Image: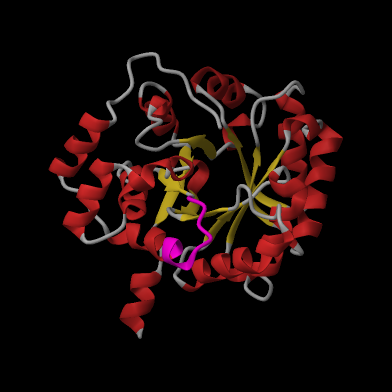
Amino acid sequence: MGATKQHMTSAQISARGGVMVPAIGLGTWKMGEKKNRRKEEVAALQLGLDLGLGLIDTAEMYGSGGAEQVVGEAIRGRRDEVYLVSKVLPSNASRKGTIKAAERSLKHLKCDYIDLYLLHWPGSYPVAETLEAFERLVGQGKIRHYGVSNFDTAEMADVMAAPLGDAICVNQILYNPAQRAIEAELLPWCAKANVALMAYSPLDQGSLLQDAVLEQIADRHQVSTATVAVAWTLRFPGMISIPKATAPAHVHAVAAARDLELSADDLAAIDRAFPPPEPGARLAIY
């Protein structure tokens, strides 16, 4: 039993400020939108916890709070097993608005604190206001750490230079074999700053599941294409991956990515099918 427990525990990524974040978890984008799918969505997140996928990512935007409510139901009685991530919309990210948004999210999640709270993408409010609110929320014990999402290199440089910006520990970004723009500038910049990157849509919203090259690699390793795609995102130190999965088989495929080591031939084949970005490539956003 001890060996099984050890096998089921996800690796941890060390981010700026000594913050430790699970390297792999589950996303909830498009969850909480249909009541007839709620039971399935809750069960998927609970299965992820059973398999040691301790990070759950959500946002106030997803299902207009519906995804957070799904998460709240899934983690009831299991809060200590979860590294919980949520996000504030830029339209709510004023000093007062950020605090109100976090409090709404906590009500949806039915818990006392969020481990990591992110600004969902750059907006019109001065980022200094948002960071001040984040810091106040930390002081109140309502969030533990904070970061950003969908920030490209220049935006990262600006926000990190702002007062309190040096506490930003994570940038959540779009990353998968078909969307590699971050490799040009953002990934090395964040690595130098010790800001962890959290890859959303590592399966490119499902489009990679039938890719012929990934299928060939999956067959060689006797795993699924989803396992290959997620493992590919995890090949860089400081990278976290948060695929969405609702079917039990897909949740198991995500968990299997922890144990898959892609060979040099595998990586070369993916590079041929999905070439690395040209210098100066800019971050894409879904």
Which residues lie in the magenta part? Answer: 243-251
Between 263 and 208, the one nearer to me in the picture: 208
Q: Position of residue 18 (x, y in %)?
A: 49, 48
Is residue 141 among the parts visible in the rendering? Answer: no
Q: Position of residue 74 (x, y in %)?
A: 64, 68
Q: What's the residue at 37%, 42% (across, down)?
A: 208
The image quarter in which residue 190 lies = top left
Q: In the rendered image, which quarter contains the N terminus? A: bottom left
Instruction: Farthest residue to the left: give it.
Output: 265
Residue 248 magenta-highlighted: yes
Q: In the rendered image, which quarter contains the C terminus? A: top right
The image quarter in which residue 120 lies = top right
Q: What's the residue at 75%, 34% (across, down)?
A: 132
Q: Position of residue 20 (x, y in %)?
A: 48, 53
Left or right: 89 in relation to 258: right
Q: What's the residue at 69%, 54% (across, down)?
A: 67
Residue 70 magenta-highlighted: no
Is residue 27 among the parts visible in the rendering? Answer: yes
Instruction: Farthest residue to the top: give it.
Output: 280
User: Against 279, is 181 above or below?
Assistant: below
Between 97 and 271, the one nearer to me in the picture: 271
